[in-house]
Image (cartoon, coloured by chain):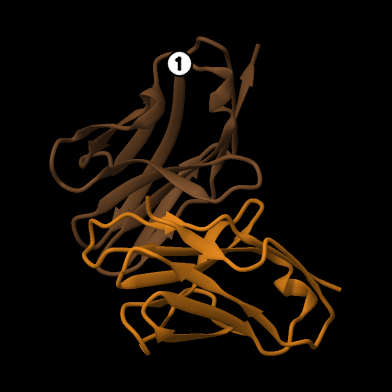
Chain colours: A brown, B orange
Amino acid sequence: AQSVTQLGSHVSVSEGALVLLRCNYSSSVPPYLFWYVQYPNQGLQLLLKYTSAATLVKGINGFEAEFKKSETSFHLTKPSAHMSDAAEYFCAVRGASKIIFGSGTRLSIRP
Amino acid sequence: DVKVTQSSRYLVKRTGEKVFLECVQDMDHENMFWYRQDPGLGLRLIYFSYDVKMKEKGDIPEGYSVSREKKERFSLILESASTNQTSMYLCASSWGGRGGELFFGEGSRLTVL
């Protein structure tokens, strides 16, 4: 079985500041991990994915995430926040079959 | 580009009505999924399908059924809609294999009165 925990349902940062969105997972098999972003009134789109290659994964829009097996974490970061990053972000894990999503983190950007 | 199309963006139905939500993908994906999205709960898997005429229950299948008669189409059916099924419904598809990411439609917001 697998599960995902996203720490913090709402994160607020200033424009230009570091963005850090936290995700911890559990999986009974080596996991495949994903981060998705959802803008208002839209479906989800893939930011990046980890599929057992490099542990540091780079995605779109300047985001990246690091897979840390010892910490069962896959935190999402961006060095400098932009107003257009305001959205909801979902971490997901795929175990043997299903893809399970976290409860989401809403990111707000202060001018 | 992969396109996943959900037939209705907004629906309003009455309690007890039968509701069909349609989803079509154009990339010959083997896998298709239905999720519902509620504030604070994230996305919860209702049903998924790995092949035509195949279906598997997800985490919250009660009150729902699905149909996959053709590879590109995956329908979600609410036999008798209830107010607690008011939600955003998201359809997704992916290639076979564990590494395949999901491609999502824009969602169908259902309100049951």
Q: Position of residue B5 (x, y in %)?
A: 52, 63
Judging by the rendered image, the residue that carries numbered circle 1 is A18
Q: Residue at 77% across / 80% down in the picture?
A: B82
Q: Residue at 39% across / 65% down in the picture?
A: B26
Tell me the quarter of the image containing the C terminus of chain B.
Answer: bottom right
Q: Tell me if A42 is positioned left or right of B25 in this view.
A: right
Q: Residue at 32% across / 54% down in the picture?
A: B101
Q: Eyeballing the image, is A70 above or below B77?
A: above
Q: Position of residue B6 (x, y in %)?
A: 57, 65
Q: Quadrant of residue B109?
A: bottom right
Count of marks overlaid on the render: 1
Q: Tell me if B6 is positioned left or right of B49 in this view.
A: right
Q: Residue furthest left?
A: A53
Q: Quadrant of residue B86?
A: bottom right
Q: Position of residue B30 (x, y in %)?
A: 30, 72
Check disc 1 and give the amino acid type: Leu
Q: Position of residue A32 (x, y in %)?
A: 25, 52
Q: Quadrant of residue A45?
A: top left
Q: Tell me if A11 is positioned left or right of B69 in this view.
A: right
Q: Eyeballing the image, is B76 above or below A83?
A: below
Query: Callout 1 environment at 10 Å: few (<14), some (14 to 19), or many (20+)?
Result: some
Q: Eyeballing the image, is B111 above or below B74?
A: above
